[in-house]
Image (cartoon, rainbow, N blue to C red):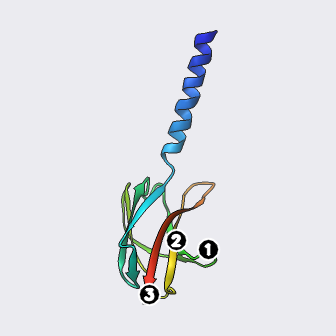
Amino acid sequence: MRISLISLFLLAAGFAVYAQEGVPRMYTIDPVSAQRGDVVTVTGDFLDAGCVTKVFLTDGSNDTQVEVTEQSKTTIKFKVPGKIAAGRLAVMILTPGPNPRFIEEPVKLLITE
């Protein structure tokens, strides 16, 4: 009885870890300040096209979709839109699937004039 309970616990823990592996996470942005038309690189985990379908810059009220120029498992490169207001904006991503989610990490980009 004791072995079967331990086995079930380990199996459940393994499923929990596996389910969390595919959650996109953003850690850094380079450069941290950019102008309209510049290409910016976000680094993190699970950022490939299978995990991230769209990328936005947001001030919390207004979301502007950006043009992704390159995407891999650990990076997303995007072009800063020409018609975006200057200011400090967060990077937000949209996940795919039947229950898509918006994810906003504390990765900020300063848009300058």
Q: Amino acid at mark 2?
A: Ala
Q: Secondary structure at mark 3?
A: loop
* Quarter where residue 38 is shown: bottom left
The residue wearing badge 3 is 82
Q: Amino acid at mark 3?
A: Gly
| Residue, far bottom | 113
Q: Secondary structure at mark 1?
A: loop
- Which of labels 2 and 3 is toward the front? 2
In depth, the one of 105 and 52 nearer the eye is 105
> Which one is earlier in the sequence, the residue at label 2 or at label 3?
3
* Quarter where residue 15 is shown: top right
**In this picture, residue 97 sits left or right of residue 71:** right
The residue wearing badge 1 is 60
Q: Is residue 80 shown above or below 4?
A: below
Q: Which mark is residue 90?
A: 2
Q: Quadrant of the N terminus?
A: top right
Q: Is residue 69 shown above or below 43?
A: below
- Which of labels 1 and 3 is toward the front? 1
Q: Secondary structure at mark 2?
A: strand
